[in-house]
Structures are given as C-alpha cells and as structure tokens.
Image: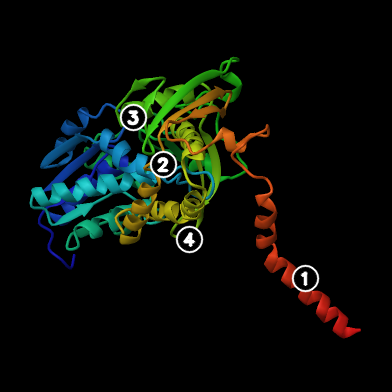
Amino acid sequence: MSEKITRIVLAYSGGLDTSVILKWLTETYACPVIAFVADIGQAEELAPLEEKALQTGAEKVFIENLTESFVRDYVFPAFRANAIYEGKYLLGTSLARPLIAKRQVEIAAAEGCDAVSHGATGKGNDQVRFETTYLALSPHIKVIAPWREWSLNSRRALMEYAEAHGIPVPTTPRKPYSMDRNLLHISYEGGVLEDPWEKPPDDMFILSVSPEAAPDRPEVIEITFEQGDPVAVNGERLSPAALLARLNVLGGRNGIGRVDLVENRFVGMKSRGVYETPGGMILREAHMAMESITMDREVMHLRDSLIPKYAELVYYGFWFSPEMKALQALVDETQKGVSGTVRLELYKGNCRVTGRKSDVSIYRPDFATFEADDVYRQQDAEGFIRLNALRLRIQALLREMLQRGKR
C-alpha cells in the first residue's frame, strides 16, 4: 500500500461480500474499521448486524434509518423531474448511492477516519456512484475498493475466506440472481437473468403480484400534490417515506411496477436488469397528469428536453455535480404551480389516470370547449397559421422559381 491508512469507514450490509471485506480491511490495512449500515427501506432486520460486525472485527458500528431523507431529498427531487433512464428505469439503486456515500463521509469526518470503502465490483455502476460522491464531498478522502485490489475473484473464494476466518455468512441457499432493495424498488440481475431471452422466475418477485393474479376489480386512488411533491393518498397526509410505502402496497397488489430491460451501464457494457417499482410507477403517472393542467407548455417542453440528461447524471453517479445542481434548480422552479389532486385506476398491471383537478389549473374549459363560446375568436387562427407557414411558403416559392429556371 503506497499510502498509510489509519482508520476506515466501510459501507456494510452484513452479506457475504461486505462481511469478508470487513475482515480483509482489518488484516490488509492493520487499522480500525467502522461499519456503517444505512437503512433505506430494504425491509431487513438490521439490529443483529451490530453484533455480527463487531465479531468480524469492526471497531464501531453505525446503523442509521435514512428512509425519510432518501425519499424526501433524493426520490422526490428526481420524480419532480419525471426522471427515467432509457425510457424504463426509475433509478431506484442510482438514487440511493449518493445518500449512503454522503453519510459515509460525514461519519468519516466525525470519527477521524482518512479512508472509506465499499463493496461494489469493478464492473458495475455503483463503484462510480460511491466514489464520485466521496470525492465531491471530501476531496482528500482515500478510497478503498477491495474488488479492484484483492485476489478473491469468485463466490467460492469468498466463502473459503469466510470459513477460514470464522466469519458468519448467510446459510440460506443462494438465489440464482442478485438482488438490491430499498424503499423505491427492488432490482434483480445476474445469474439466470444474464440471458436476455430467459424469462424471470415467477417466484422471484417480492413487491408485486403478477398482473394475472391481481384482483379482477380496479382499485381507484387519489394522490394530492403540493409544488410537485406528493403529500397525501386518498386524502390522508403522509410523510415522504410513509407515502411511498403506501403506494408500493397499492401498486404491488394490483400487479403494477414490473420492468424488464437491457440497459447501458456507464462503464460501457450492456446489462439485463429486472425491477419492481410499484409506488414509483404510480407516482410518475400521477405527477405527469398533475403537470398537464398546471404547467405552461413551453416550460414543460423545456424541462422534458432535459429529462434524459437528468436521468443520465443520476445513473452515472453525478448527483453532487454542479450541472446537477443547476438542473435541479430549473426543475424545482417549474414545479411551483404543480399542486392539486390526481385520480388513478389501478388494474392488473395498469395505472390509468381518470381525473385531475387543481385550484391553480391553467386548463380553461371556456377556451377549450367545442361548444359556443365568447372568449376565443376563431378568425384569429387564420393570421396565426399564415404567419407560422410563411417560411414554408417562401421555401415553396423558391422551389418554383428554380424549377422555372431549368425549363
């Protein structure tokens, strides 16, 4: 090791990888390691991880509930932008990483640590997301990425290391795919899913029933928005995390939120991912419906033109970049009037908007009606059309002139 490391904070989950990493760090760097566990809604019992981490060699363990911050400060801002990567992915894993990494460097500063570590592999996106956040917020921090350093290059090697060092690891049979869960989604990849022709196993899904198994009657819900953020479901005001959890239940039991795509990783390769995002899918549909009656056309079109860039920045790991800050400021400015209520019908995998209303709606029935009105002069349309067609007429006149010249 070229630089002396004196103390490390590890992003720790208690699984095989980070359990081995914890022991490997203490042996390789011969310094204290702090284990940090972030609760972002993965629906796991996290309390036992403290004892497990201490037994594996951690000097100290932090277990923190970050669910409200995750939804309020990361999920909701992205959904104000209607962010979606490559037309399908609602960025569940991508949005969680900057929060975890941010808290990690805060703990490092508070505990006098000069290094941070993570369990992301050298092939994926997460290594970029973690490390760009580390360096954006703590430019002098040292970063340790064991998967890019050690010789343990297989699950078998990790299991053998764990057994040799007395590290307790999960004894349940390994699923034929990897899974990552938080309050926004569950992602599945690897294993049997690496064949893009292979259908995902029916018993794989956790948050949602299959559309075929969903109820035969539609479920009608209402979501209320204030300045672009959802604040209530069916009239009940909820905290950000509680609201998303409620939508996950509503969407999941109606077979909503499953996505299967082959996406382009930042590092250059394609990867097949299967996702469950029931609450997120409902929320995006509802938000766009709310915008449809409250947002100016040109403002909407400008914001929409930036969605691919916004989603790309999140996916690539640049949440704390200056361009992201500028984009978010523009997005948030567009949302000041996005308030009201949307009604949706959930039915067998479909989420259909059936109504929207707002006290600040710019939809005007007296202008839009096909019936008689006294607020719109239809004769005005003639000049509007002729002026907008003027450049097209000039092009046509030029073609006529050139054709006559050839005769």
Q: Which mark is residue 171?
A: 3
Q: Residue at x 39, y 49 (%)?
A: 331
Q: CA distance from mark 4 to mark 3?
A: 34 Å
List x then y, in percent, for residue 43: 33, 28
Tell me if 54 is positioned left or right of 277 in this view.
left
> What's the amino acid at mark 3?
Thr
Q: Using the rendered image of the protein, determine whether residue 121 is visible from the camera's viewpoint.
A: no
Few, some or many residues within 10 Å of mark 2 (<14, 14–19, 20+): many
- Amino acid type indicated by mark 1: Ala
Instruction: Choose the circle earlier in sequence order: 2 or 1.
Output: 2
Q: Quadrant of the N terminus?
A: bottom left
First-in-chain label (3 vs 2): 2
Three-letter amino acid code at disc 2? Phe
Residue at 45%, 56% in the rendered image = 309
Name the element at disc 4: loop
Q: Is residue 97 visible?
A: yes
